[in-house]
Image (spheres, helix red, strand yellow):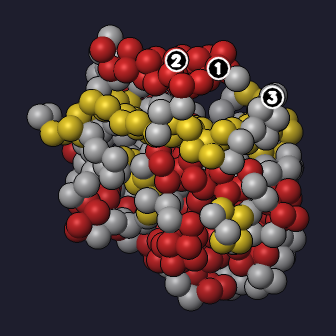
């Protein structure tokens, strides 16, 4: 697909590779209900080109996917947004509601028990840690991005209500019907399609983890290994379900998702969500300081809402996906080179010039 109108965006993408600012990535954009850019470039591993079906770990870009699994059950009447979590998850101690889990105000932003990297493969262990934890603030009073815990809180509610693990639920109820190439907990065949993550600079993990003792440090370093290439590129990580941070996706799949949400919950004639649910899911639920991010943040039910009215999520390392209802586009950029968001900003500037 080569829409001449968006040639400058494609040129900018290729410039990032030519300049060495990017080593392997995918970019997909829908505009006015149609795919207008869908390109990949660089390498997924040394000597092997990035292909249209190359999957890459996109960190928090996956949080909205986990949220949408739970929201699909809300839309079907299986649970309510203002139900106490404990009504569906017996033994869950924090007096938080489903809505508070979804909008990062539940008060459980870090796993309470230090765990080694191997724990990413033990769903029940980590969910048990969360169920027994005292919240770090009164649920609903303030937000703090639930950096590593979000997917277990949301995903265990999906499992308790539906019976299926969140990875299988996503595959069968959302990714399958909408033709999205993405998932949690990859099997062997999908793992063979993965790009290996690399550091844009060696200081990236230290910078990302912030000061030892800070909430951010506690949140993103436990379980261990979530910033360590030896773990991130391993079958353990790719095969585990850590939905807050280990969605593996193509840009094409993510752009299709946001195009469907932008259209009110219907994609290619397949309706997954009611327009009312999409409106509630993308409405600002919390507007104020985020204790983990250290800045004003507007949370919807699983996404961040920006000044220009767009909603979506970026991930550590530079991957991003969102919808801009004002300008009428859905955008997804996925990268294996863990660095900052300047690459996305460059592409968005080019896109807005085209519009």
**Coordinates of residue 310 in the picture (x, y in percent):** 75, 37
Residue underneath mark 3: 308
Which numbered tag is attached to residue 50? none
In this view, the residue in front, 347 or 60, is: 347
Q: Earlier in the sequence, mark 2 or mark 3?
A: 2
Q: Is the Cβ of the residue at disc 1 closer than 8 Å to that at disc 2? A: yes
Q: Measuring 29% from the left and 26% from the top, which residue is drawn there?
A: 23
Q: Earlier in the sequence, mark 1 or mark 2?
A: 2
Q: Residues within 10 Å of mark 2 (few under 14, many from 20)?
A: some
Q: Is residue 297 above or below residue 275?
A: above
In this view, the residue in front, 187 or 290, is: 187
Extreme residue toward the left, this view = 47
Residue underneath mark 2: 8
Quarter of image, res 93: bottom right
**Element under disc 1:** helix
Q: Residues within 10 Å of mark 1 (few under 14, many from 20)?
A: few
Q: Measuring 23% from the left and 34% from the top, which residue is drawn there?
A: 43
Q: Measuring 79% from the left and 40% from the top, which residue is drawn there?
A: 325
Q: Earlier in the sequence, mark 1 or mark 3?
A: 3
Q: Measuring 61% from the left and 42% from the top, which residue is drawn there?
A: 30
Which numbered tag is attached to residue 354? 1
The answer to whether any part of residue 224 appears in the image is no
């Amino acid at each position: 697909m080569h829409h001449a109108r968006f040639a400058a965006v494609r040129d900018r993408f290729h410039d990032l590779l030519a300049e060495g600012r990017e080593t392997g990535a995918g970019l997909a954009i829908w505009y006015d209900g149609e795919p207008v850019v869908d390109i990949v470039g660089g390498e997924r591993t040394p000597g092997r080109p990035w292909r249209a079906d190359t999957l890459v770990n996109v960190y928090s870009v996956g949080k909205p996917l986990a949220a949408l699994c739970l929201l699909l059950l809300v839309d079907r009447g299986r649970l309510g947004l203002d139900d106490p979590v404990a009504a569906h998850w017996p033994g869950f101690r924090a007096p938080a509601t489903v809505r508070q889990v979804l909008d990062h105000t539940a008060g459980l932003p870090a796993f309470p028990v230090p765990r080694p990297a191997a724990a990413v493969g033990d769903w029940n262990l980590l969910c048990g840690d969360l169920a027994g934890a005292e919240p770090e603030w009164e649920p609903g009073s303030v937000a703090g991005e639930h950096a590593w815990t979000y997917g277990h809180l949301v995903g265990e509610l999906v499992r308790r209500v539906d019976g299926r693990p969140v990875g299988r639920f996503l595959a069968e109820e959302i990714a399958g019907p909408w033709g999205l190439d993405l998932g949690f907990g990859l099997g062997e065949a999908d793992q063979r399609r993965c790009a290996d993550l690399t550091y844009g600079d060696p200081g990236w993990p230290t910078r990302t983890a912030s000061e030892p003792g800070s909430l951010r440090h506690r949140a993103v370093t436990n379980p261990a290994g979530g910033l360590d290439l030896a773990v991130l590129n391993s079958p353990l990580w790719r095969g585990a379900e850590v939905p807050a941070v280990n969605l593996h996706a193509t840009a094409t799949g993510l752009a299709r998702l946001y195009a469907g949400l932008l259209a009110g919950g219907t994609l290619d004639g397949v309706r997954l969500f009611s327009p009312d649910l999409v409106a509630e899911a993308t409405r600002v639920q919390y507007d104020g300081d985020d204790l983990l991010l250290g800045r004003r943040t507007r949370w919807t039910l699983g996404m961040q809402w920006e000044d220009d009215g767009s909603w979506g999520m970026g991930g550590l390392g530079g991957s991003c996906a969102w919808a801009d209802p004002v300008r009428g586009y859905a955008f997804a950029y996925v990268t294996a080179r863990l660095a900052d968001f300047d690459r996305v900003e460059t592409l968005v500037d080019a896109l807005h010039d085209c519009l």
